[in-house]
Image (cartoon, rainbow, N blue to C red):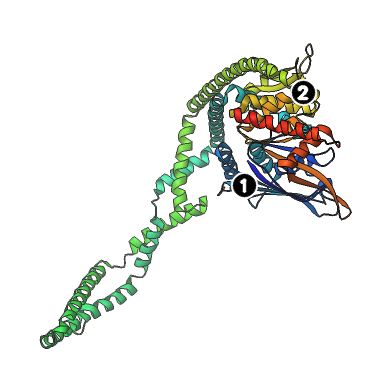
Amino acid sequence: MLERLFIHDLALVERAEVVFAPGLNVVTGETGTGKSLLVQAIDLLVGGRGDADAVRAGAKAAVVEGEFRLEGRAAARVSAELESWGHVRDADTLIVRREVHAGGRSRASVNQSPVTLAALRQLGEILVDLHGQHEHQSLLRADAGLETLDRLAGLEAERDRFASALADWKSAAAELERLRGALLGYAERREFLSAARRELDEAALRPGEDESLRIEAARLQHADRLREWVSGAHERLSESEHSAAAQIGVAARALAHAAELDPALADMLGTLEEARIATEETGRLLSGYLADLEADPESLEAIEARRETIARLQRKYRRDVPALIAWRDEIATQIDEAENGEAALTRASSDVTRAREACLDVGRALSRRRRKAAGEWTAKLSRELAPLGFVHARLEFAVESPEGRASEPASTGLDEVAMRFSANSGETPRPLRKVASGGELSRIMLALKTALEAQDPVDLLLFDEVDSGIGGAVAQAVGERLRRLSRQRQLVCVTHLPMIAAIASHHLCVSKHAAGGRTVARFEVVEGDARVEELSRMLAGERVTETTRRQARELLGESNLKSALR
């Protein structure tokens, strides 16, 4: 839900803060006061085109900032979208900002993090659905027919099954291509890989072997010096008359005599005993080390030969020992695959065929469901359009399955779905863009949104021109549908009809004023007597009388009564 909209230096708006409420919000004002600026501001927030002409004369940039409160499905969808960008939503409020500079540059941010306009448009499709002039109509997007039909018919689960089957098909096809590439690569490098495998098999490298060989080679190379140093240490610890072990023994006996006179010294005897044991154990270990330490030219020669073998393999194949061991396993896999290449290709090709047929079966079943639903909803929507001023209109879903879609299907299925419209009986339905005006498109979308109602995933709907060229019973029917939709989600409706303005739960009025020699537009919430005055103006124009005020109060009273009954 959009809670606040901040506008700065956008066309006639110098600075404005517009507050919205849940339910139906209406925007009214005299012709030319700038009601469309509100639509333009929200359109900029959701990635609409930002022209330098939109910047207020003399200003450096136009800035629009929207504060959205997220709940339920919208919150989950926004979180998923932000995560796909690498962002995390850490609150229930989302701040979207858009700047359009006088030089033509445009910048956007979400929760103070810069985003591209493409990303902003993706997010905007989750936050807001705009319906008004042709450039604002989500109804005219290329995928609108298919998305709308699937939601009306509840086909999302079948579509997900198709997407899963398509993913399996693509995975099987990718494995087949990988196998073909591997076999082709093996054929070109057969001799090299076979020789490398033989060489690595013969080498039988072990993890960590190069390091252990380096240490052993160093020990054998320096055996004489090691013997000299270790012998000296061994003698000083335990072999000579004045060795450390002997001196500790003398110290222990002296301390024992002292402890007989002062028991406080007894605890130190334990420490000396530990030192004696440690010294003797170290001497024993050094004695064993010396017994095993020999200058062994043959062993050293074998170790150096082994080290040279490892070094040669590393130089030749440009890999360290762990990589050589892993590569040997990779080569073995490639050779095994190649030896069973034809059988593997046959199996992989069969897997692709099965996955393709399974996917197309799901796709054909989905197409049948769509065609059936298209016939049912064409009739339902044509009936729904009648009260909205389209007595003889026909809105149909044309489901087509082009030949090429079976070989390269989209994740949505094998079909293309177009919405076609004819306003009068006997006319052939044609694409919406070619036959419907902005006001007609808005009323068609109102009919679709009413039919979708709880299934619609977007929380904010913006209608501009929905009441263009209508009145009487049609206006009443439009108002009833707006009221009905507003129980499920937030609506913003730009209107010039008092009977629609009267049913709103929140009424904004746009006006123009002269300030400092310039014209500025202002947005104000009207309540109580101010709302009565605005409805009176809408009823009578400039000649507001007590009669028109009474009519305005009656409209408000009737609207409140109908709301209470519902």
Image height check: is 154 above or below 72?
above
Residue 419: x %, y % from top left: 71, 22
| Residue at screen point 45% across, 44% down | 328
Image height check: is 442 above or below 43?
above
Quadrant where the C terminus is found in the figure: top right
Residue identified by numbered label 1:
94
Asked whether, in this view, residue 169 is left or right of residue 443, the answer is left
| Residue at screen point 64% across, 39% down | 127
Q: Marks 1/2: CA distance?
A: 40 Å
Residue type at tag 1:
Leu
Name the mark on residue 472. Answer: 2
Residue 239: x %, y % from top left: 20, 79
Residue type at tag 2:
Gly
Which quarter of the figure has residue 417? top right
Which marked residue is nearer to the observer: mark 1 or mark 2? Answer: 2
Can residue 51 be seen here? no
Which quarter of the figure has residue 410? top right
